[in-house]
Image (tube, rainbow, N blue to C red):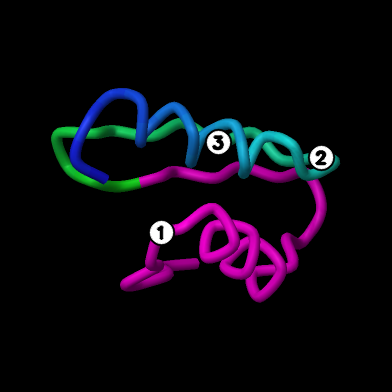
C-alpha cells in the first residue's frame, strides 16, 4: 500500500467479509483484523490478493 486510497481499498475488502472488522494503518503498512469467530485467514488473504495487494505476514 502506497497511498490512502490503497489503504482504504484493502480496509473495505476486508470489512466486506461477514463478521470481520478491519482497520488499516498506512504508516505501518499493516491491517489489524478483529473477528468474534475464528477468521478464515486463507479467504482473507485471497480477498486481499484479488484486490491487487500482497499479504506478507499474518500474526494470530
Label 3 and label 2: CA atoms lie apart by 10 Å
Residue at figure coordinates x 49%, y 34% from the top left: 9
Q: Is residue 43 above or below residue 2?
A: below
Residue at figure coordinates x 32%, y 72% from the top left: 56
Q: Is residue 43 left or right of residue 12?
A: right
Upstream in sequence: badge 2 or badge 1: 2
Q: Secondary structure at mark 3?
A: strand
Label 1 and label 3: CA atoms lie apart by 15 Å
Residue 22 badge: 3
- State the residue in front, 36 or 44: 44
Q: Nearer the viewer, mark 2 or mark 1?
A: 1
Q: Is residue 29 left or right of residue 32?
A: left
* Other residues around mark 3 within 10 Å, as few (<14) / some (14–19) / many (≥20): some
Could you tell me residue 20's position as x and y percent?
Answer: 71, 40
| Mark 1, residue position | 53
User: Magenta part of the protein: which range?
Assistant: 31-60
| Mark 2, residue position | 19
Q: Is residue 21 above or below residue 40?
A: above
Q: Secondary structure at mark 2?
A: loop
- State the residue in front, 16 or 58: 16
Amino acid at each position: 500500500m502506497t497511498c490512502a486510497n490503497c489503504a482504504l481499498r484493502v480496509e473495505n475488502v476486508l470489512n466486506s467479509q461477514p463478521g470481520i472488522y478491519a482497520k488499516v494503518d498506512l504508516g505501518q503498512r499493516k491491517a489489524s483484523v478483529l473477528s468474534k469467530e475464528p477468521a478464515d485467514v486463507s479467504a482473507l488473504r485471497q480477498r486481499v490478493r484479488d484486490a491487487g495487494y500482497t499479504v506478507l505476514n499474518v500474526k494470530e
